[in-house]
Amino acid sequence: MTIQQQIYWHTTTQMPDDSSLAPLPDKVDVAILGGGYTGLSAARTLAKQGAKVAVLEAETIGWGASSRNGGMVLTGLKLGMQTVQKRYGRDLAKRLFQYSLDSIDTVEQIVKEENIDCGFARNGHLLTANKPKHFDALKEEAEFMEKEFGHKVQLVTRENQREEIGTGLYHGALVDEVSSGLNPAQYVTGLASAAEKAGATLHARARVNRLERSQNRFSVKTERGSLSAESVLVGTSGYTREVTKRLQKKIIPIGSFIIATEQLPSELANELSPKNRMIFDYKHYLNYFRLWDNRMIFGGRAAFFPETANTIRRSAEILRREMTQVYPQLRDVQVEYVWGGTLDFAFDMMTHMGELDEIYYSLGYAGHGVAMATHSGRTLAESILKGSLKEHPLAAFDFPGAPLGLYNGFPWFLPFAGAWHKFLDWVE
Ligand SMILES: Cc1cc2nc3c(=O)[nH]c(=O)nc-3n(C[C@H](O)[C@H](O)[C@H](O)COP(=O)(O)OP(=O)(O)OC[C@H]3O[C@@H](n4cnc5c(N)ncnc54)[C@H](O)[C@@H]3O)c2cc1C
């Protein structure tokens, strides 16, 4: 069987399509750009409070990273909490870490309240050490997390590692039992139904091309007509483009790619990941992987540029090689699917929420968006309704642009950054 360039998750559910396009309303309270976790979660919260909300999606609902990701619902931020504390001080670091825990609770709560069948489970995550000194860093991290945040994680020595993962490759690992896993496409589909049930209208093939402001309202021009909105909220993540140019210049779109194997015998699947953890390694150019329905779902930043047929094809080979380095047992196993998606990184690697040119936004999830985008959509909506956005922990620090302003939205420096990360993985 040849490898299909197709998102495996999409074969596990009926994704929203564009078979019946609802006409756009003339006038709404809030127009939301982007039909992923951010936009849909915000829409659900706003509509529940009685606001008239339209979600405008350029492709089909859930088309972006929200149906393509690894389904890891993780504690913490992209940056380690020691770095966050050094940069922002103890109080804000505490609020930010708590925010990451609340994000997982929000996902769990929505899944329960809305009866979303997406396999949400608190399986925990496993962070593996690629080198002995990474294990020393994990030890330090574990002590820091307990002392500063009262958050307990467990260290796993190299000797005991096979209780957690079926490989001898790593030099020990760290387990965080609070993290969770789910099927991202089933989750975003359920979130879309929940937003609709709350009263929001969802519009596929409604790319927003222009936003004009006059008399305290926005005229929102989409590819299939215009509408008038009191407020605009942007949840376009790694797909942020010229229509919000000032935000586009603050976000670096980075490709990430995933392969899915054929279904493995249960015994083999159980050997690879006996506790069904969400696994990722300590490298800059990292791999992340987990099981779903006895398939190994194995991802990484195999090419830095966002997905094209070419980067996806190359990624299949690279990821297969990396997967068999971790798990030689998978050498003869068929890889059935490969796909890519685009992540959103801010220049400081932090998530940002706020208001720019009177437009609300939440962006920069840096690979933590399953939990954070869901919670941020919700809390951004709540902050707008209460008028308390300035107090939000993700609005408490600057949203920097590129150093020296050397960026207009096309990430020309990615090949250099990619090479730099590979170099760091070699020397560090
Ligand atoms: C391969 C991959 C693996 C990942 N793995 C994980 C993981 O395991 N755990 C984790 O926490 N995070 C992971 N992430 C990140 C996570 O998926 C994202 O952070 C999250 O889905 C962002 O949600 P969002 O709603 O903000 O954006 P998206 O889901 O990307 O949605 C943005 C939408 O905006 C639309 N759009 C753009 N411009 C316009 C416009 N002008 N008008 C209308 N619509 C527009 C796009 O079409 C898109 O559908 C991964 C991402 C990728 C790509």
Image (tube, rainbow, N blue to C red):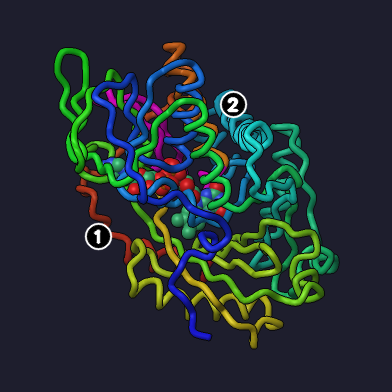
- Asked if residue 75 is positioned above or below residue 341 in the image, the reply reads above
Q: Which residue is mark 1?
A: 412
Does residue 351 show up magenta in the picture? yes
Q: Count the marks: how many?
A: 2
To which quarter of the image does residue 29 belong? top left
Q: Are marks 2 and 1 in contact (CB under 8 Å)?
A: no
Determine whether, in the image, residue 79 is placed left or right of residue 356.
right
N-term mark: 2 or 1: 2
The stretch of residues the image draws in magenta is 346-370
Position of residue 121 measured from the top left corner of the image (x, y, whole percent):
72, 47
- Name the residue located 43 percent from the left edge and 72 percent from the top edge: 5
Determine whether, in the image, residue 312 is placed left or right of residue 8.
left
> Callout 1 environment at 10 Å: few (<14), some (14 to 19), or many (20+)?
few
Indicate if the residue with disc 1 has its beta carbon within 8 Å of ligand 1: no
Query: Which SS class for mark 2?
Result: helix
Position of residue 46 measured from the top left corner of the image (x, y, whole percent):
45, 22
Q: Which residue is mark 2?
A: 95
Of residues 331 and 212, the one nearer the viewer is: 212
Q: Quadrant of the C terminus?
A: bottom right
Does residue 60 show up magenta in the picture? no
Residue type at mark 1: give it: Trp
Position of residue 52 measured from the top left corner of the image (x, y, whole percent):
38, 20
| Residue 78 in view (yes/no) | no
To which quarter of the image does residue 250 belong? top left
Disc sitting over residue 196 in the figure: none
| Residue 144 in view (yes/no) | yes
